[in-house]
Amino acid sequence: MIYTKIAGTGRYLPEKILTNFDLEKIVDTTDEWIRTRTGVERRHAVAPDQTTSDMCVEAAKEAMEAAGVAPEDIDFIAIGTTSPDLIFPNVATLVQHRLGIPACPSIGMEAACTSFIYALTTVDKFIKAGEVKCALVIGAECITKLVDWSDRNTCVLFGDGAGAVIVKPSEEPGILTTHLCADGQYKDLLYYPVGASNQLEKAGTDEASIMMTGKEVFKVAVSKLGDIALQALESAGVSKEELDWLVPHQANIRIIQATAKRLDLPMEKVIVTVQDHGNTSAASVPMALDVGIRDGRIKPGQLVLMEAFGGGFTWGSVLMRL
């Protein structure tokens, strides 16, 4: 049996750091209010001229170095993001060219905060079909460029960054199960109101910013993430006790804690980066995975569950042996 195995990880965070105390100066909020409700203490923000592809390139270089692969080794690229550089071409084609990777399938995927999980799941199918030998998968976001900095309910949450993984076929267990889901009935609870074919005239105005009904998003997120986590374990035939690590979407510390409780998992077995990164949307899971691997907590052979939840709503999981 062919498995998809992660061979290397990397991440990139912009230089600029916005602390909660910085936000106190620009919006009606406090460090205590933000920390107790979200768990966020600081977040990184791109420079005005910095793009999603800029961050992707840097994260990819780290992952490629960790995996010991050269540009010519890569034969597939999938990038999940809601904030691409351009409407077209897709951001993966820009990254392919900038990294000097030979012509290959290069796709951008948009499933809000679940975009990386969607991208990794797609690549997993190609590898298991025998069509891909070395893939670059990235989750990246310039989400601060979509935020209304006068809205304290949303601007305190988000940050920018990129996380990347190199994946290859392996005979040893790697990705065991993947699950994806979406339900558009919830679209009005979390969305961005401007698109290429809808209200484009509002782009760049005060009406173009992330819209969120926080309490309702929280309720659905906790329910769906708990369900899909249990579904992943059941599908793989493993118990909750066998799980070594949960690497969740870093949206909110309360959502993370609720999901861990549903799995009877102590927080010591959960990778938490929300305090340092904020909610980086599609980038949060791969960056948290990279943090856990590089600081030595997540070790080869351990059972890891990655999961995310995003606007749409979309949600998904990847259960794997590292």
Image (cartoon, rainbow, N blue to C red):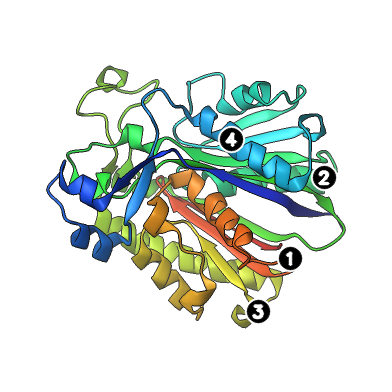
Q: Earlier in the sequence, mark 2 or mark 4?
A: 4
- The residue shown at (21%, 29%) is 207
Q: Residue at x 65, y 57 (%)?
A: 178
Q: CA distance from mark 4 to mark 3?
A: 34 Å
Dots 4, 3 in contact, CB < 8 A: no
Depth check, mark 1 against mark 3: the one in front is 1
Q: Quadrant of the N terminus?
A: bottom right
Q: Earlier in the sequence, mark 1 or mark 3?
A: 3
Is residue 166 shown to the viewer in this render? yes
Q: Nearer the viewer, mark 4 or mark 1?
A: 4
Whichever of labels 3 and 2 marks the residue nearer the N terminus, that label is: 2
Query: From where the camera sits, is residue 123 visible?
Result: no
Question: Mark 3 = which residue?
Answer: 242
Q: Sequence order check: which comes first, mark 4 or mark 3?
A: 4
- Per the image, label 2 sits on a secondary structure element best described as loop
- Quarter of the rendering occupied by the C terminus: bottom right
Q: Earlier in the sequence, mark 2 or mark 1?
A: 2
Q: Which residue is mark 2?
A: 129
Q: Nearer the viewer, residue 225 or 158?
A: 158
- The residue where tag 4 is placed is 58
Q: Which numbered disc, 4 or 3, marks the residue closer to the eye?
A: 4
Per the image, the residue denoted by label 1 is 300
